[in-house]
Amino acid sequence: MKPKTYIHLSTDERDILAVLKSKGHSLREIAEILKRSPSTLSRELKRNAPPVNTGYYLAHKAQERADRRKRESYGRTRLKSDAIRRYVEEHLRLGWSPELIAGRLSLEHPGLSISYEAIYQWVYQEAPYLITFLV
């Protein structure tokens, strides 16, 4: 069984969606024309419609919103909690590996968790002064 994949709408598809929507076509009709699922178009309209529901969809504004979300998705902080950052830094300085830290954190502090991969990413991207402590 082939896994489902989701491909975001292109700028051209957003333009066609905006024009056909403004002409009163249903999502099913538009989906057939674009060879897309109606749920994909519905999701697009919910995500990228104007913040105040005014009943219209502007393709260029929708593209800007989609591009901004994509850009911002790469800039997220790896370790959001100060408690987790302190715990990770303290235990790296003690010589613990990221794998051990990730495993022990949730045992010692129920409700807190982090993956060892997130620890590595955090160290390399946001705390390079800790690289020398990586085991």
Image (cartoon, helix red, strand yellow):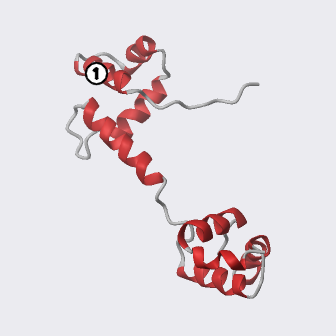
Query: Residue 126's spot in the image, x, y percent?
Result: 53, 70
* Amino acid at dot 1: Lys
Question: How many numbered circles are shown?
Answer: 1
Classify residue 134 as left or right of residue 13. right
Residue on which disc 1 sits: 21
What residue is at 55 percent from the left and 66 percent from the top? 125
> Residue 51: x percent and y percent?
26, 46
Tell me which residue sits at (61%, 31%) in the image: 5
- Quadrant in the rendering for residue 130: bottom right
Badge 1: few (under 14), some or many (20 or more) residues near its Cα, within 10 Å? some
Q: Quadrant of residue 16?
A: top left
SS type, badge 1: helix
Report the front residue among 21 and 74: 74
93 relative to 40, above or below = below
83 or 42: nearer the eye? 83
Whether residue 110 is visible to the viewer of this picture, yes or no, is no
The image quarter in which residue 27 lies: top left
Residue depicted at 47% across the width and 52% down the height? 73
Which corner quadrant holds the C terminus? bottom right
* Left or right of 132 in this view: 10: left
For residue 32, say whether it is visible: yes
Q: Is residue 34 left or right of residue 80?
A: left
Q: Say above or below: 86 vs 67.
A: below
Foreground residue among 123 and 4: 123
Give the farthest residue toward the left: 54
Measuring from the top left, give residue 52's x and y in whole percent. 22, 45
Horizontal placement of 49 versus 124: left or right? left
Which residue corresponds to the image point at 66% horizontal and 80% vertical from the top-left? 88
Quadrant location, the N terminus: top right
